[in-house]
């Protein structure tokens, strides 16, 4: 069995208040008051953060407040939030809340992407971090894992840079290699399952080897799972994911 999920989305309100104060007094008793114009400085209210990092999110399994474990799954390029639900059904464990965000960028051929240019990696990473922090604030007792396939795995790998982020596991299925824009911490916090097909013709196998080297140099606990197939998620990788979540 292989889960072949091919990789692959103020107006500002200004208030100008002009108050014209005209003092009209009796010149026999008080000096003439001159007209005065007073303008208050515009005050902008604090923006209210959008829920879930501003992403469209689908929840499956246990209600978030009741879950012992939260699993966030990031789809690949030109896919959608439904793409990894069959995988989630297989790895799901009791008292698990699965979270499927949809990437914010629509692509011409259909589906959605986390990035179509370099600047998008930073903005999408910020959205995923905001999502994770809100999930954690909603249920601080639950462990959090983040997984992704293809472009989603590439995005998930960037979370390894933040040692304060409450993520216990990263599941990276066939990611691309991005030079980390800031140095990894001395000790990468989450455990990492890194899997990539030797015959992948979409994202090169060597990308995963470079990622593996970077993670190991920063004392990451990595389960490295190369396999003899292409751009897919084979059964042995799915089984390893389920086993790790069940511990």
Image: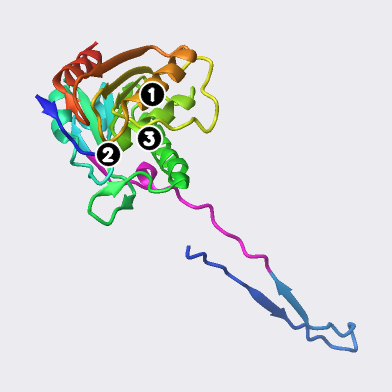
Quarter where residue 19 is shown? bottom right
Badge 3 crowding class, 10 Å Cα cut-off, few under 14, some 14 to 19, many 20 or more, is: many
What residue range appears in magenta?
A: 40-58
Q: Is residue 177 above or below residue 16?
A: above
Report the mark closest to the observer, 3 or 1: 3
Report the mark closest to the observer, 1 or 2: 2
Instruction: Give whichever of discs 3 and 2 has the lower sequence position.
Output: 2
Q: Position of residue 49 (x, y in %)?
A: 44, 47
Rendered residue at 57%/59% (across/down): 44
Badge 1 crowding class, 10 Å Cα cut-off, few under 14, some 14 to 19, many 20 or more, is: many
Query: Residue 233 has which mark?
Result: none
Q: Is residue 196 magenta?
A: no
Disc 3 secondary structure class: helix
Q: Position of residue 73 (x, y in %)?
A: 27, 33
Q: Is residue 194 above or below residue 159?
A: above
Of residue 76 and residue 36, the one placed in the foreground of this image is 76
Rendered residue at 27%/36% (across/down): 202
Q: In whole angstroms, how far apart are the C-alphas of marks 1 and 2?
A: 20 Å
Of residue 105 and residue 46, the one placed in the foreground of this image is 105
Q: Quadrant of the C terminus?
A: top left
Q: Is residue 124 left or right of residue 7?
A: right
* Residue at the spot of label 2: 76
Instruction: Give whichever of discs 1 and 2 has the lower sequence position.
Output: 2
Badge 2 crowding class, 10 Å Cα cut-off, few under 14, some 14 to 19, many 20 or more, is: many
Query: Residue 155 has which mark?
Result: 3
Q: Quadrant of the N terminus?
A: top left
* Residue at the spot of label 1: 167
Magenta stretch: dominant secondary structure: loop
Q: Position of residue 148 (x, y in %)?
A: 29, 31
Q: In whole angstroms, how far apart are the C-alphas of marks 3 and 2?
A: 10 Å
């Amino acid at each position: 069995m292989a889960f072949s999920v091919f990789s692959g989305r103020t107006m500002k309100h200004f208030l100008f208040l002009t108050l014209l104060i005209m003092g009209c007094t009796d010149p026999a008793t008080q000096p003439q008051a001159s007209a005065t114009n007073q303008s208050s400085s515009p005050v902008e209210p604090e923006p209210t953060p959008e829920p879930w990092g501003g992403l469209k999110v689908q929840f499956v399994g246990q209600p978030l407040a009741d879950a012992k474990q939260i699993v966030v799954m990031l789809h690949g390029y030109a896919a959608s939030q439904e793409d990894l639900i069959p995988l989630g059904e297989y790895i799901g464990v009791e008292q698990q809340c699965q979270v499927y965000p949809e990437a914010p960028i629509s692509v011409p051929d259909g589906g959605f992407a986390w990035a179509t240019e370099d600047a998008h990696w930073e903005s999408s990473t910020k959205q995923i971090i905001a999502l994770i922090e809100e999930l954690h604030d909603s249920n601080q007792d639950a462990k959090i894992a983040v997984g992704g396939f293809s472009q989603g795995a590439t995005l998930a790998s960037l979370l390894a840079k933040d040692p304060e982020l409450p993520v216990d596991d990263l599941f990276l299925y066939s990611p691309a290699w991005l030079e980390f824009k800031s140095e990894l911490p001395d000790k990468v916090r989450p455990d990492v399952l890194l899997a990539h097909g030797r015959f992948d013709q979409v994202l090169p196998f060597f990308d995963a080897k470079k990622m593996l080297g970077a993670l190991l140099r920063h004392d990451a606990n990595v389960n490295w799972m190369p396999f003899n197939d292409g751009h897919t998620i084979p059964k042995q990788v799915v089984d390893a994911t389920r086993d790790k979540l069940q511990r």
